[in-house]
Image (spheres, rainbow, N blue to C red):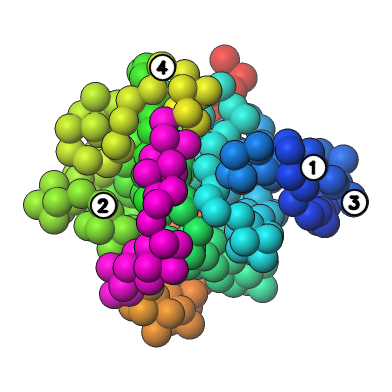
């Protein structure tokens, strides 16, 4: 996890043929383009590791709205980092938090998941590096995942850090890989190497590089060329209905549980120790 960076709010619209317009932000946290195939490529670029803070989450949420509003047929989520898809939630959003911001942070994370997991349009993830915790959640929320080969890992490793993953994180993993494998992965906080992630079904294909991962995502999207879009989306959302409804029915309770968690003095003490350890490591 990395320290917060100030980020202004950006306003944009999708423009075809690979063009993009931006306003109000010199260093945007995401890049959204529609290519000549009519596929939106959404690139996270909160360097160095795309840690998910409130600003990046808001930008992702707005981007999903743009893709839906423009009725783009599909979206591929990827990263500008050469080695990290997303390192997960930004720890600084939980350390000595302003409660209003903490509530906004968690409710926006919920919105991002609801919009991505429940998207009408086709979704795929070109995972070009490490994808632990929140990064794994984003990629699992997509319908298809191509991950670049290398010494990378992916998984929900919360329990290994003494953290309990929220029920909707668990739901997403149980929806992605067999229940028994999900239970073992969640209880041990397992991070899967790329080859093992493929075997268990956490990813669908292994790519040679980012361009190849995007190409594999496009090949998946092309499978639906002759499938009526409405039939496809209704079928998808019917299959995903259970997890979506469970979070929608418990959003307030889930936010309250998060606020209670970050307000726990023992949790704050643990975060303090972790941050200090990272500072010492950075000095070496």
Q: Is residue 201 visible?
A: yes
Q: Nearer the viewer, mark 3 or mark 4?
A: 4
Confirm or deny contact between disc 4 and disc 1 (CB under 8 A).
no
Q: Which residue is mark 1?
A: 20
In the image, is residue 156 above or below residue 255?
above
- Identify the residue at image location x=69%, y=42%: 33
Percent coordinates x, y for residue 184 in the rendering: 14, 47
Q: Nearer the viewer, mark 3 or mark 1?
A: 1
Q: Which residue is mark 2?
A: 176
Which stretch did the figure color magenta? 216-243
**Magenta includes 247?**
no
Q: Is residue 125 left or right of residue 93?
A: left
Badge 3 element:
loop
Confirm or deny contact between disc 2 and disc 1 (CB under 8 A).
no
Q: Is residue 37 left or right of residue 193?
A: right
- Identify the residue at image location x=27%, y=41%: 202
Residue 5: which numbered mark, if any? none
Q: Earlier in the sequence, mark 2 or mark 1?
A: 1
**Residue 197 lies in quadrant:** top left
């Amino acid at each position: 996890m990395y320290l917060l960076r100030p980020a202004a709010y950006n306003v944009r619209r999708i423009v075809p043929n690979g063009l993009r317009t931006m306003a109000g932000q010199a260093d945007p946290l995401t890049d959204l383009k529609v290519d000549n195939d009519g596929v939106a490529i959404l690139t996270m670029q909160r360097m160095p590791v795309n840690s998910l803070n409130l600003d990046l989450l808001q930008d992702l949420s707005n981007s999903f709205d743009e893709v839906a509003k423009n009725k783009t047929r599909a979206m591929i989520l990827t990263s500008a980092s050469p080695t990290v898809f997303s390192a997960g939630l930004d720890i600084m959003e939980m350390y000595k938090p302003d409660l209003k911001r903490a509530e906004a942070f968690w409710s926006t994370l919920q919105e991002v998941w609801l919009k991505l997991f429940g998207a009408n349009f086709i979704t795929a993830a070109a995972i070009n590096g490490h994808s632990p915790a929140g990064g794994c959640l984003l990629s699992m929320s997509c319908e298809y995942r191509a991950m670049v080969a290398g010494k990378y890992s992916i998984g929900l490793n919360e329990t290994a850090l003494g953290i309990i993953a929220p029920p909707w994180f668990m739901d997403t993993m149980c929806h992605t890989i067999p229940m028994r494998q999900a239970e073992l992965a969640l209880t041990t906080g397992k991070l899967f190497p790329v080859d093992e992630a493929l075997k268990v079904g956490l990813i669908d294909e292994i790519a040679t590089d980012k361009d190849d991962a995007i190409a594999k995502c496009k090949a998946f999207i092309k499978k639906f060329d002759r499938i009526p879009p409405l039939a496809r989306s209704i079928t998808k959302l019917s299959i995903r209905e259970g997890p979506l409804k469970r979070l929608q029915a418990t959003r307030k309770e889930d936010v309250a549980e998060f606020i209670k968690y970050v307000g726990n003095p023992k949790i704050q003490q643990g975060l303090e120790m972790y941050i200090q350890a990272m500072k010492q490591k950075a000095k070496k």
